[in-house]
Image (tube, rainbow, N blue to C red):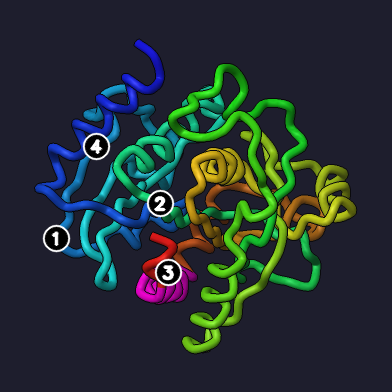
Amino acid sequence: MDLMEKLSESKAYIESKLGGRKPVIGLILGSGLGDMAETIGEPAIIDYHDIPHFPVSTVPGHKGRLVAGELEGKTVLCMQGRFHYYEGYSMEEVVYPIRVMKMLGINALFLTNAAGCVNTSWKPGDLMLITDHIKLIADNPLRGSNPDALGARFFDMTQAYDKDMVALASKAAEDLSIEVRKGVYMLFTGPSFETAAEVRFARLAGADAVGMSTVPEAIAASHMRMHTMGISCLTNMAAGILDQPLNHEEVLETGERVKKTFSALVREIVKRWPEEKL
């Protein structure tokens, strides 16, 4: 069975659970941030393991299900937990849900993650609007044969993160009196945290945050010309900045601490998301 046939089967199963609703925004909630899905109205909940050809999330803090419903007047499809390269999935498997979202007619993608803070002027708990990313690892989710039905073989990445949406999000944060940063996210494969030397390299390369997700999804979304924006919750200072070891519990704890602010900002952005970018 080829990719498009698999995508069609996944799409058909999800549609059968939506009761005729048509989601217009896809949301991916990262480590420690998944509770926002609990605020979605009239939810339809679909476990990943029930969806044909879908991977299954294995990371603590990722519930592993789709939640579809109403959020600030718009129908959304939310992933409570994503898939990572370090779990053993291929890059193509990591972005499979993004392609399913496109098949469902979703043209707007909202990516969130927990990230390590590289910018020494910032602090844990800050929220960063992603303006661009750096990917130096060799693998790419679009390596191999190109599914022409989804997008062109070669495509532009200069607006991987929609500049208009960054401006809209910045204004929403200002109106809510929420301080946000703007910066560049750099992908590392994990699951080991970055070394102090790698963090110094990331800073020299122009990164403000480091993490183990988001970039493959943004690449796949750009391929399909989806309007994409991203927010990082900076859960800890990256390796070598403070004289203390890193651990996943700190990531989850910081996510818990900022979840009300994070949720308020995400809801406001969804509320203001313009029709022409849906």
Q: Secondary structure at mark 1?
A: strand
Disc 2 from disc 1: Cα separation: 22 Å
User: Which of the two discs, 1 and 3, labels the residue nearer the N terminus?
Assistant: 1
Query: Label 4: which residue?
Result: 47
Furthest-left residue in this view: 19
Q: Residue 266 — which label?
A: 3
Q: Earlier in the sequence, mark 2 or mark 3?
A: 2
- Magenta segment main secondary structure: helix
Q: For marks 1 and 4, give the one nearer the viewer.
A: 1
The number of discs equals: 4
Residue 94 picture location, percent across and down: 49, 32
What's under tag 3, amino acid-wise? Val
Q: Residues within 10 Å of mark 3 (few under 14, many from 20)?
A: many
At x 13% / y 37%, what residue is drawn? 16
Query: In the rendered image, which residue does mark 2 sit on?
Result: 107
Task: Give the residue displayed 42% in from the left and 50% down from the top.
Answer: 28
Earlier in the chain: of badge 4 and badge 2, it is: 4
Q: Judge left or right: residue 238 versus residue 256.
A: right
| Image position, residue 98 (x, y; %) | 43, 40
- Residue 67 vertical position relative to residue 4 in the rendered view, above or below: below
Q: Is residue 13 above or below residue 245?
A: above
In this orientation, which residue lies closer to the viewer: 48 or 235? Answer: 48
Residue hosting label 1 = 42
Q: Position of residue 5 (x, y in %)?
A: 32, 19
